[in-house]
């Protein structure tokens, strides 16, 4: 009840901090749920090993507009840890975490430092390619696989990354318009 009262009552620093923690917790949970759904979809379709739609990336793309790099890293790390604990092994956690980390770094650099050069769709595209690259390098190093063995699978992964990166960017534009109108992230 106390937390609810703080959350509702106003603009105090404590109230804003509580609101921020609640919103970030919800975003981490949403990313994790979308990632689990994504994993389920890819396991029952023709997509193949390592290929995901990247629907959790929609949340990260929207967060790029409202949060700083440190917060994006926190959301990404907590999502990866949560999904790793629920679904995976240490290897799948590391592979997903490195891909997500590289993706957030690339997207943040493009979006925050070159905003006139990159739309949210192109930022998503770059993030998808960075995620795939991070995962492929991690698989290669973790499993001691020569890069030549990953050439054919990487073609499939990169082609799909281009398609899904663009699609998630387009969806993110729509979600962003909604968040702007509804002022969901106001005072965070």
Image: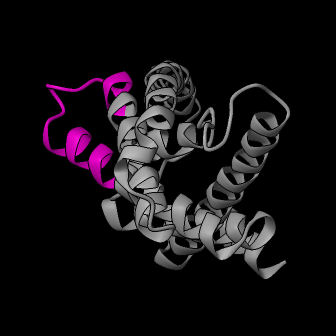
In screen coordinates, is 24 left or right of 30?
left
Q: Position of residue 116 (x, y in %)?
A: 14, 26
Q: Position of residue 102 (x, y in %)?
A: 35, 55
Residue 108 part of the magenta segment: yes
Instruction: Tell me where residue 41 sits by quadrant.
Output: top right
**Residue visible at 14% across and 36% down in the picture:** 114
Does the image show residue 165?
Answer: yes
How many discs mark residues in the rendered view? 0
Q: Residue at x 70, y 63 (%)?
A: 83
Q: Nearer the viewer, residue 54 or 183?
A: 54
Residue 179's place in the image compared with 32, above or below, is above
Residue 75 seen anywhere in this rendered image of the structure: no
- The quarter in which the N terminus is drawn is bottom right
The quarter holding residue 79 reads bottom right
Nearer-the-camera pick, 179 or 14: 179
Q: Residue at x 22, y 26 (%)?
A: 118
Residue at (25, 39) in percent of width and height: 111
Vertical relation: 109 (above or below) 76 = above
Magenta span has 44?
no
| Magenta-highlighted residues | 104-123
Residue 7 or 131: which is nearer the viewer?
131
Task: Give residue 87's position: percent from left, percent from top.
Answer: 78, 63
Give how far across and how far down residue 165 sits, in percent: 46, 27
Image height of 66 relative to 169, above or below = below
């Amino acid at each position: 009840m106390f937390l609810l009262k703080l959350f509702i009552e106003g603009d105090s620093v404590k109230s804003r901090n509580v609101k921020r923690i609640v919103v970030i917790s919800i975003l981490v949970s949403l990313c994790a749920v979308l990632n689990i759904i994504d994993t389920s979809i890819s396991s029952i379709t023709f997509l193949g090993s390592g290929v995901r739609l990247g629907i959790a990336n929609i949340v990260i793309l929207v967060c790029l507009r409202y949060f700083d790099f440190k917060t994006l890293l926190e959301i990404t790390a907590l999502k990866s840890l949560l999904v790793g604990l629920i679904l995976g092994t240490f290897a799948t956690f590391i592979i997903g975490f490195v891909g997500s980390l590289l993706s957030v770094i690339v997207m943040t650099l493009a979006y925050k430092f070159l905003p006139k050069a990159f739309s949210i769709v192109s930022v998503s595209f770059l993030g998808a390619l960075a995620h795939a690259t991070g995962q492929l390098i991690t698989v290669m190093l973790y499993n001691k696989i020569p890069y030549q063995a990953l050439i054919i699978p990487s073609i499939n992964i990169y082609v799909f990354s281009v398609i899904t990166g663009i699609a998630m960017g387009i969806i993110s534009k729509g979600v962003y318009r909604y968040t702007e109108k509804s002022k969901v992230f106001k005072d965070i």
